[in-house]
Image (cartoon, rainbow, N blue to C red):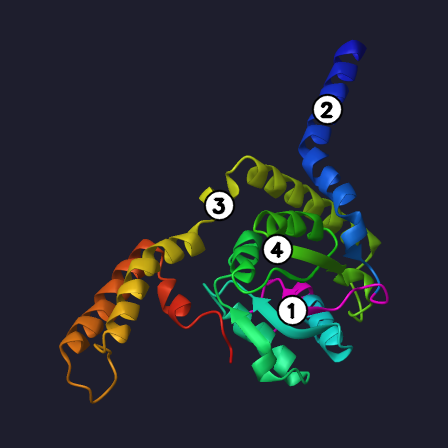
Amino acid sequence: MKHNKIQLAASAILVILLVLTPQLVLIVRFDDSIHRHLEDLPPREYGIVLGAYVNEDQRLSDAALERIAAGVLLYREGKVQKLFISGDNRSHEEAEAIAAYAIGQGVAEEDIIVDRLGIDTHDTCRHMARRATEGILLTQGYHLPQAMYMCEREGLDAEGVAVNHLGLLAERGSGPLVIWTTRVLRFGREALLTWSFVLGLYDKVSDEAEGVDRCEQPYALFRLWLSFAGFDNKPGRVVPGRAIGHWLDENGRNRCSRSAKGLLPVRVAAMRYQ
């Protein structure tokens, strides 16, 4: 009986180590690029604010508040010139709420780029990589290794700031037990997500943004051709392409919306606040 318990305990430890291994490897690999203080942080053009939960009344969760507060701090100190704010806009206009906080704290509106389809971390990295080749990732320490790995895979050279080490929140959690339980659960969650990314499952499970990108491209290219050909859809212009353009806008968007769970309307106006 005692022998069976030892075997069971050993098996449990091996499973835990197997689950945690990719995350532990990433922690060691990116340790030199993760900053817990701003003094040694090299300046970059973009600070990349990863989205987090926003309440129905547009109040930011502690995670979202801490991330954007760090972005505002870097902007004020000249560490970044612009903020790329990414968020999941399937509900509660997450990205806009975070951007509104930054504007309220004095960040110039023209220095904010909003990515309304940052549904997951890889989406944010992929969208940012279309705009620049480097930046500073702003998120909590437990999230940084995975985020930096995903951005690296997209060709983005990123430094990381562990925002939970900057003392930006007045209080954190309701006690040590709650805080450490939350940290352990988050670490386990990140480890599982890292495994899913390594195995190629991550984007198959969370593929809404990819679906919008794939669906929108043919319509966007045709609309661009219409514009170059002079067949645009400007009000008051009676040209052959106007009806075509209108049909494309209506039917194309509707088809894409259905295939991508209604996300295209926010994608059409996405990526830029300015």
Give the CA separation, mark 3 to mark 4.
18 Å
Instruction: Give the magenta part as a residue range.
Output: 38-64
Give the CA separation, mark 1 to mark 2.
41 Å
Front tag of 3 and 4? 4
Q: Secondary structure at mark 1?
A: strand
* Relative to 268, 20 lies left or right: right
Name the residue beneath numbered marker 4. Answer: 156
Q: Earlier in the sequence, mark 2 or mark 3?
A: 2
Q: Residue at x 82, y 61 (%)?
A: 165
Front tag of 1 and 2? 1
Figure label count? 4
Image position, residue 147 (x, y; %): 64, 52
Q: Earlier in the sequence, mark 4 or mark 1?
A: 1
Q: Amino acid at mark 4?
A: Leu
Q: Earlier in the sequence, mark 3 or mark 1?
A: 1
Whether the residues at callouts 4 and 2 have beta carbons within 8 Å, the answer is no
Front tag of 3 and 1? 1
Name the residue beneath numbered marker 2. Answer: 14
Q: Secondary structure at mark 4?
A: loop
Front tag of 4 and 2? 4
Q: On residue 203, which mark appears?
A: 3
Give the CA separation, mark 4 to mark 1.
12 Å
Magenta part mainly helix, strand or loop? loop
Give the CA separation, mark 4 to mark 2.
34 Å
* Relative to 64, 141 lies left or right: right
Q: Earlier in the sequence, mark 4 or mark 2?
A: 2
Q: On residue 225, which mark appears?
A: none
Give the CA separation, mark 3 to mark 1.
25 Å
Q: Amino acid at mark 3?
A: Asp
Name the residue beneath numbered marker 1. Answer: 46
Q: Secondary structure at mark 2?
A: helix
Q: Amino acid at mark 2?
A: Leu
